[in-house]
Amino acid sequence: MEDRGSLKPEEEGSKYESSSSIKVYGMQFSYDGQTPLFADFNLDISPGSRCLLVGANGSGKTTLLKILAGKHMVGERDVVRVLNYSAFHDTHLVCSGDLAYLGGSWSKTVGSAGEIPLQGDFSAEHMIFGVEGADPVRRDKLIELLDIDLQWRMHKVSDGQRRRVQICMGLLHPFKVLLLDEVTVDLDVVARMDLLEFFKEECDQRGATIVYATHIFDGLETWATHLAYIQDGDLRRAEKLSEVNELKNSANLLSVVESWLRSEIKHEKKKPINPPSQIRKTSPFGTSPFVSSRHMAYYR
Ligand SMILES: Nc1ncnc2c1ncn2[C@@H]1O[C@H](COP(=O)(O)OP(=O)(O)OP(=O)(O)O)[C@@H](O)[C@H]1O
């Protein structure tokens, strides 16, 4: 692809074309002691875009979204930029609500225990009204849209009902960039379609930008404006949905993505251009042939 990693707005002359909402330049990232997941990753997403992030299990979608959400420190300030700030260093992005991340599970990080599920007998009302500074009109709209009963006790509701409250809380502040990691998976079809419509309005009316990682493609052919496809940490495709050639000859997005994933060749993991010092410091194995690898998993 000629302009790899660049997702520009639908029309030239758009009022949002002047700057990027999300810009990733030359990103390298490894989990501790592992070979790099991202070796030289570039991405450029314009305001107003609704970008689907697709890829096989383990291809790096969640990791990328978490990096964009400022949850991992990656490189210098200029490597991962959101709204022209450093996603990790400029904490006001998240504190102001401009950058919002809705991830897969509703949990909190507790010291060395890591991520643990939220527990306790709280009402939906307590949770939602506990979010400070929310606009009451927006709050009422979301409660209605997600059909939330404020009397729900959070430890007694279904997964989908709990998810609705999580989504409502995450959307109370009018975000400028929203990162969604498979959050509609528990929702029934009505809630999902209503929510997608709400997201569309947020992008069209306020120029908000959404990156949505999902394996469920129903209804997304007309919802998304752009598509980014990741394979093993490499950005294989990044283009307007209307320019995905395969879509013109396929029944739907599902069959296009299915054919991409089926034709994936399993590559050897890439080597870092400049091996991050982090790996050298943290790996107890150095260059030992006994270093743990994906291939050795077969023998465990
Ligand atoms: N906390 C972690 N520590 C070490 N490796 C991790 C960690 N989280 C993810 N990985 C590895 O990073 C790679 C990418 O994982 P990631 O969760 O980003 O994939 P994904 O595309 O979101 O997958 P899925 O579609 O299954 O959600 C995988 O090989 C995974 O094993």
Image (cartoon, rainbow, N blue to C red):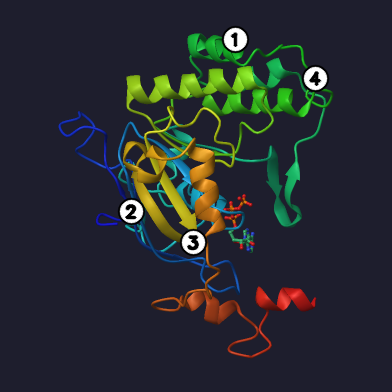
Mark seen at residue 5: 2
Q: Amino acid at mark 2?
A: Gly
Q: Quadrant of residue 207?
A: top left
Could you tell me how far apart the alpha carbons at marks 4 and 1 are, in whole angstroms?
A: 18 Å
In terms of depth relative to the viewer, which is nearer, 68 or 243?
A: 243
The quarter of the picture where the N terminus appears is bottom left
For residue 129, above or below residue 93: above
Q: Nearer the viewer, residue 8 or 31?
A: 8
Nearest-to-viewer mark from 4 and 3 = 3
Q: Secondary structure at mark 1?
A: helix
Query: What residue is at 50 percent from the left and 53 percent from the top?
Result: 260
Question: Which residue: 51% across, 47% down?
Answer: 257
Q: What is the C-alpha distance between the residues marked 4 and 3?
A: 40 Å
The front one of 234 and 272 is 234
Q: Earlier in the sequence, mark 2 or mark 1?
A: 2
| Front disc: 2 or 4 | 2
Crowd band around label 2 with a 10 angstrom C-alpha radius: few (<14), some (14–19), many (20+): many
Residue drawn at (53%, 67%) of the image = 265
User: Which residue is label 4 attached to?
Assistant: 153
Is the C-beta separation of discs 3 and 2 under 8 Å? no
Residue lying at the far bottom in this picture: please name it.
288
**Disc 2 from disc 4: Cα separation:** 44 Å
| Label number found at residue 103 | none
Earlier sequence position, callout 2 versus callout 4: 2
The residue where tag 3 is placed is: 233
Q: CA distance from mark 2 to mark 1?
A: 37 Å
